[in-house]
Image: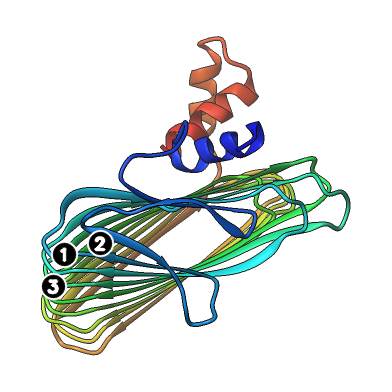
């Protein structure tokens, strides 16, 4: 792994080298290294699709796996399918993410489309962390289109933390989930766009079981001429609680759209949506500038705190 690939790995997975436990590191369209454990098995797909199947044994506790993707070859475009089969009564952490380095020149596009499907067994707990990051000479385009499909069995829970750090010119982020009785789904999205970048986020959650709960929270900053579109659809098909929140800072000549859709199909479905879009408050800038920061430095500190 060269210096560029090591830097990408650090940015997206906080790894300084090969991780402990189960992992699959994908680089430039192929598996670079892999390790399995007694409780977590990772196998290459045999159905003709590119990707892996991950199997976590029932009862597995306090284990983690890393499945980062790195693209440093300019112009490489791929679609990868990863399926996660999480056994009953487990408690695991999954760290994913994709980093692209593109110095291929004008009109050279590097692209990664990742389709992740989770089958989470009864009473299982999953924490899923995914970071996206792009860098390069500024001439080529970095494109990422993550699709996440989550099936939560009775009493299962999943926390999904997604972050787009910087450098992604175009992204379509799709998340779909269906939930059985007593299931819990929490999504925390953080997104930053600048230049002429475009980011589309689309959530669709079907709450089908009694007493299930879903919380979707998105925080974003749109700067310069970038465009963001946030769509969230919650379908309460049983006695349940659903909450979706979009909080965005808009700067310069950027554009942000938030479009909630709540559908209550049960008399005991409780669905709530909150949305706020606005600029950085002037008093916040003034306060920091009185401490010796320039206006730009003050903006950076406010954005950092907002997306923390």
Q: Quadrant of residue 213?
A: bottom left
Mark 3 to mark 2 CA distance (whole Å):
12 Å
Mark 1 / mark 2, whichever is N-terminal:
1
Q: Residue at x 18, y 80 (%)?
A: 180
Q: Is residue 219 visible?
A: no
Q: Residue at x 16, y 64 (%)?
A: 124
Q: Is residue 287 visible?
A: yes
Residue 283, above or below 79: above
Image x and y of residue 110, in percent = 72, 57
For disc 3, the neighbor class at 10 Å (few under 14, some 14 to 19, many from 20) is many
- The quarter in which the C terminus is drawn is top left
Residue 183, above or below 250: below
Q: State the residue lying farthest toward the bottom.
A: 265
Mark 3 / mark 2, whichever is N-terminal:
3
Left or right: residue 50 versus residue 58 is right
List the residue tagged with mark 1.
124
Mark 1 to mark 2 CA distance (whole Å):
8 Å
**SS state under label 3:** loop
Mark 1 to mark 3 CA distance (whole Å):
5 Å
List the residue tagged with mark 2.
158
- The quarter in which the N terminus is drawn is top right
For disc 2, the neighbor class at 10 Å (few under 14, some 14 to 19, many from 20) is many
List the residue tagged with mark 3.
122
Q: Nearer the viewer, mark 1 or mark 2?
A: 1
């Amino acid at each position: 792994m060269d210096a560029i690939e090591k830097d990408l790995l650090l940015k997206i997975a906080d790894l300084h080298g090969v991780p402990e436990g189960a992992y699959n590191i994908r680089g430039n369209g192929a598996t670079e290294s892999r390790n399995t454990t007694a409780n977590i098995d990772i196998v290459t797909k045999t159905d003709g699709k590119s990707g892996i199947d991950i199997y976590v044994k029932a009862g597995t506790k306090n284990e983690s796996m890393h499945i980062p993707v790195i693209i440093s070859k300019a112009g490489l475009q791929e679609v990868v399918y990863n399926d996660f089969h999480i056994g009953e009564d487990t408690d695991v952490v999954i760290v994913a993410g994709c980093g692209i380095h593109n110095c291929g020149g004008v009109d050279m596009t590097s692209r990664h489309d990742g389709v992740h499907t989770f089958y989470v067994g009864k009473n299982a707990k999953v924490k899923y962390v995914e970071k996206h990051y792009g860098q390069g000479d500024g001439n080529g385009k970095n494109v990422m289109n993550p699709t996440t499909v989550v099936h939560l069995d009775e009493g299962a829970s999943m926390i999904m933390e997604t972050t787009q750090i910087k450098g992604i010119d175009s992204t379509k982020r799709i998340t779909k989930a269906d939930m059985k009785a007593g299931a819990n789904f929490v999504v925390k999205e953080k997104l930053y766009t600048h230049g002429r970048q475009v980011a589309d986020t689309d959530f669709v959650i079907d709450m089908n079981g009694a007493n299930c709960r879903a919380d979707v929270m998105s925080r974003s900053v749109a700067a310069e001429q970038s465009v963001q579109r946030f769509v969230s659809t919650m379908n309460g098909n049983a006695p349940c609680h659903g909450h979706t929140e979009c909080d965005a800072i808009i700067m310069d000549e950027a554009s942000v759209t938030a479009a909630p859709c709540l559908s209550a199909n049960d008399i005991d479905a409780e669905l709530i949506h909150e949305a706020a879009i606005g600029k950085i408050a002037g008093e916040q800038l003034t306060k920091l500038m009185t401490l010796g920061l320039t206006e730009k430095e003050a903006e950076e500190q406010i954005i950092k705190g907002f997306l923390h």
